[in-house]
Image (cartoon, rainbow, N blue to C red):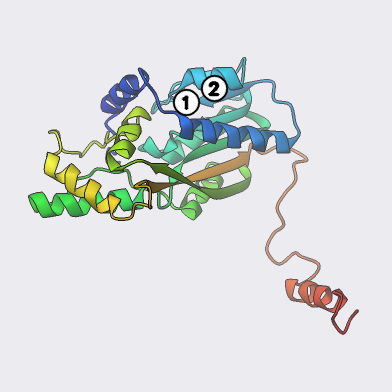
Amino acid sequence: MSQLTDRPALDRQRARAARNPALFLQESAADDIQDRLIEVKRSFTAPAVVTPWPDLWAERLPGARIVADAEVLDLTEGAHDLVIHALCLHWADDPLGQIIQCARALKPDGLFIAAFFGGETLAPLRAALAEAELAVTGGVSPRVLPMAEVRQAGALLQRAGLALPVADLTPLDVSWPGALALMRDLRAMGEGNALAQRLRRPTRREVIARAAARLEEGADAEGRITARFEMITLTGWAPAEGQQQPMRPGTASHRLEDVLRAAREAAPGTDGD
């Protein structure tokens, strides 16, 4: 497997970001996960959270085991009824391996939740940087993580052996007073370029200036630009006896076509009224 992430570089970026972090997206992911846990209507007594930001989750889930984001997770097999992988799976060289490690750490009927960036996250920024670098240097270097699509991500749950898999995507639009402010906040999130194949020299100022100008062509009347982050959330359960099972294709007692026809006929104002 080719190496995607330069882990020492990522750790250095996160350490620098921790001095004055911008964790509003981490907070948003944590809010969403907590809302989902409320909907489950179940108490979890042995949770674990995989996160590069331990203070954030220590406050939200007191008593949870906080696990560093690493290639090999410090999790004990069968020890937890809830494992959360909190907004760092997109940096994994082997996301399936990460999910399998989390799945093995679950007790029967334990819940796994992962949130991470995917889809078209920062697509305009990616395009602007590529255009600018090509214009200035005649080539394009790796700068932004490849992003998983929600269907691809959802398939990982089944491959990891988790039951009742669900994958969904939430777009988050955030505005900044300019492109440079966006880039500064990305560094303060610990989400700068830590790709293994990145250039090992500073980006030329002309590249940054061109990319910023390109992004700011779409600024609003107040000069603010908007960037979209697409957050994929995965949920799955460790298999257990007596657990609800999804229906197999072809086992439904009524065809969808028949159900919809009956609903139309019963609706007010139709012939079936």
Label 2 Cα crowd, 10 Å radius (few <14 / some 14-19 / many 20+): many
Q: Relative to 128, is 75 above or below? A: above
Tell whether 187 sits left or right of 106. left
Q: Relative to 141, is 255 above or below? A: below
Outermost residue to the left? 137
Q: Residue at x 28, y 22 (%)?
A: 12
Q: Depth-wise, is mark 2 or mark 1 nearer the camera?
A: 2
- Residue 228 locus on image (x, y percent): 42, 48
- Residue 254 locus on image (x, y percent): 80, 70
Q: Residue at x 54, y 22 (%)?
A: 57
Task: Say which of 260 and 213 sits in front.
Answer: 213
SS for callout 1: loop
Residue that mark 2 sits on: 57
Tell me the quarter of the image containing the C terminus: bottom right
The quarter holding residue 19 reads top left
Outermost residue to the top? 63
- Looking at the image, do the residues carrying marks 2 and 1 touch, with CB atoms under 8 Å apart? yes
Q: CA distance from mark 2 to mark 1?
A: 8 Å
Residue that mark 1 sits on: 51
Circle 2: residue type: Trp
